[in-house]
Amino acid sequence: MTKLSLGAYPHMLGFEQLERLLERTAKSGNEGYPPFNIEQTSQRSYRITLAVAGFAENDLSITVEDRQLVIRGRQSDDGAERVFLHRGIASRQFQRSFVLAEGVDVGDAIMENGLLHIDLTQVLPETVVKTVKIKKG
């Protein structure tokens, strides 16, 4: 099977970065931990909610890297002297990534009841009509 690229379409100019972004997203391999929801909260706003039970605010980091929202979690190992008879609560580190469209801004991050909420807002660009003058050669 031949892989098609956006460069194969002559009317789509300047989309090489989009193609790289799609490839990076496909390779990110977010396994499934922690589970998350994405909800639309208004016409132009969204909320990502991650189930991060057992993580404190200091154990989590949220960054935006090259139009990619990255949430990382690493719990400090404070239970070295604790003896578990059964350990069913996950305490592993994670990294969860979400690709953001151009014009999507990351707003507040709120932690409540073991859930991390991250609010996103889509800012629409102004419609610009530009007339190009033709010069004599």
Image (cartoon, grey):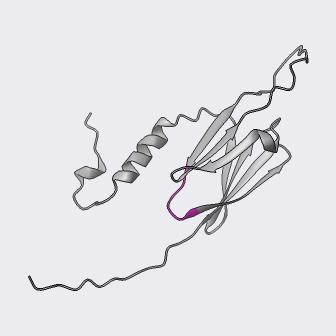
Q: Quadrant where the C terminus lies? A: bottom left
Residue 37 or residue 122, whichever sits in front: 122
33 with respect to 56 (left or right): left
Identify which residue, 72 or 98, lies in the foreground: 72
Q: Residue at x 60, y 62 (%)?
A: 105
Q: Nearer the viewer, residue 42 or 100?
A: 100
Residue extent of the magenta highlight: 99-104
The relative height of residue 42 versus residue 136 in the rendered view (above or below) is: above
Q: Quadrant of the N terminus?
A: top left
Residue at screen point 49% across, 74% down: 125
Q: Quadrant of residue 104?
A: bottom right
Kindly identify the residue that appears in the image at 53 percent across and 34 percent down: 29
Residue occupying the point 51% across, 51% down: 66
Work out whether 89 lies above or below 7. Answer: above
Q: Position of residue 36 (x, y in %)?
A: 68, 43
Q: Looking at the image, is 98 positioned above or below residue 125?
A: above
Q: Residue furthest left?
A: 137
Image location of residue 95, percent across then percent down: 63, 37
Secondary structure mostly seen in the magenta stretch: loop
Percent coordinates x, y for residue 102 in the rendering: 50, 61
In the rendered view, would you say 4 is above or below 17?
Answer: above
Q: Where is residue 39 drawn, in percent x and y?
A: 67, 56
Q: How many marks?
A: 0
- Foreground of the two, 43 or 127: 127
Confirm whether the magenta stretch covers residue 97: no
Going by the image, does 101 lie left or right of 49?
left
Left or right? Give the position of 56 relative to 43: right
